Amino acid sequence: MAKWKLKEKPKEEVKQTKKFLPQKKEKTAEELEAIEEKKAKQAEAKAKKKAEAEAARAKKKAENATKRAAKKKVSDKKKKERAQKREKFYSKGFGKVLAIVGRFFAKLGHWIAVPFVFLWKLIVKGVRKFFQLDDDTAPNLVDVKKEKKGLRRLDNRQRAMRNRAILVAAVVVICPIVILGGFKVAGALELNGGFAGSTGDTYFKEADVTKYITEQTLYKQYAKSLSTWQQYLSMYGMTTETFREKCIQDKFQHEEMVRRACDHEGITVDEDKVDEHVASFRAKYDSDANYKKALENAGFTEDTYRDNVKQTMLEKALIEKVITVDAPSDDDVKTYLSSASSTYKDARQSSHILFDAKDTATAQSVLDQINAGTLSFEAAVAQYSKDEATKAKGGDRGWDKIESFTSAYNNGLSGLSAGEVCKELVTDSEGIHIIKCTAKWDTPDTIESLDGVPQAIIEECRKKKNESNQATELTTWLQTFATDNGIENKVFPMPNGLPYYTEVSASSSSAASSAATTTSTG
């Protein structure tokens, strides 16, 4: 078979052929620049398209969030309306009967709870004894089955033991479920049935009023013993009933009327401003634990404190819009200062140097240098103080009767004379303080002139008097607003068994009305 072989072309022919093939042409600088420009435009168009897609997705996401927020708002409104209808139902008629029945079952549940626990222990003890669970000689059915290597029919004794075990288990499991279910139903009826008062169709729960009185009023201060609480009420001519009524009116009904008036006037509060106020208060404490402890001491949680700040801002905005009062004169200030002379008795102005809570060694060294005269207080403030708010003012914190200091700080300041620096470090939730008393003033028996009264105290009294005038005018305005809009405020009779109740005979109820206004809600 012949073998074929590729015949090679002569070199001269190959060279001649290459002349007619397309030759690769080098690109010019202009062509390369055009190509790069084209690529840049393509990349820019691609980036623009991607940005538009991301913007569209973000817009869609924002629209969905807005829809969810609107849906949630409608849902919350419906929930609130249902809750108000439910509360209204349990406040009168058949609902009130259900509430009474609920309270009865709640008390019945409490009566049953203690003996039930005792009964449960007896049942468990009896079961263990009956089945000889602690006896090592008791027959082991598993071993018997293993020995027989198969299923074995239970004899009469074992069948009876099984049935008794099932019965005991049913009693032990079902009884707690039934009783706890009764507790839950009774508790729900009690919660929805116990109201202290109302503003229009809004009802205030007795439990909320009790919590407010026991945690945020002067009851918390005076209730260390029953006698001191009775003395406080007697001093202002109040009974427990009138004290409760005043708290409902001044706190719950007043705040609800302010909210309704703000809705009517189109007044809102920027949530960011509320957040700023809360954050500024939080910044005063070096840890979350100390911040929460300060709130707890004031009777607040983080949520209730925020609600309180928002309510205060709403009321201030309402006053600015609907109330106009003349600025207090010097005579008004003198009258107010005379009536509040005990408030400003033994007042002290102070400056401080603040150190971190862990910087005890540095703080002690600085205090020793100040007391030795080798370091001035003012220089130490500029060099060491962590309190940026007062650092520029030489550490000045103002007057103790105006500003809110911790009890530890007040105790450290109380024994100092003007110009004196504390001998020992003062530690509180803010950190470590070196305190200097910069001025001292005591209210005279009679105030005939404002000469000699510290300007800060004059301005504070002027501010307090102005706020008092505004509060009085706002109360009158809200009463007119309620009448014009058919809003009725009610205080329901006080139930028995409230924790702050005590027997007091009010000897001077007429004097109580004015005194309680400024003192009862603390």
Image: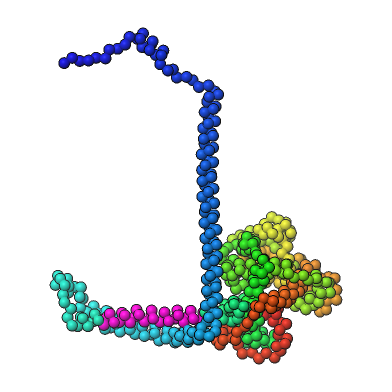
Up the image or down, 111 lies above or below 293; here it is below
Residue 462, position as x, y percentages in the image = 78, 70
Q: Quadrant of the C terminus?
A: bottom right
- What is the residue that sits farthest to the left in this orientation? 148
Q: Is residue 101 left or right of residue 200?
A: left
Up the image or down, 97 lies above or below 345; here it is below
Q: Is residue 140 left or right of residue 506?
A: left
Query: In this view of the protein, can residue 82 be seen by the observer?
Result: yes
Seen at 70% across and 58% down, the residue is 391
Q: Which image quadrant for residue 307?
A: bottom right
Up the image or down, 290 lies above or below 473; here it is above
Seen at 64% across and 71% down, the residue is 259
Residue 312, position as x, y percentages in the image = 66, 69
Seen at 69% across and 59% down, the residue is 389
Query: In this view of the protein, can residue 432 be seen by the observer?
Result: no
Q: Magenta segment range?
A: 164-191
Residue 270, position as x, y percentages in the image = 64, 62
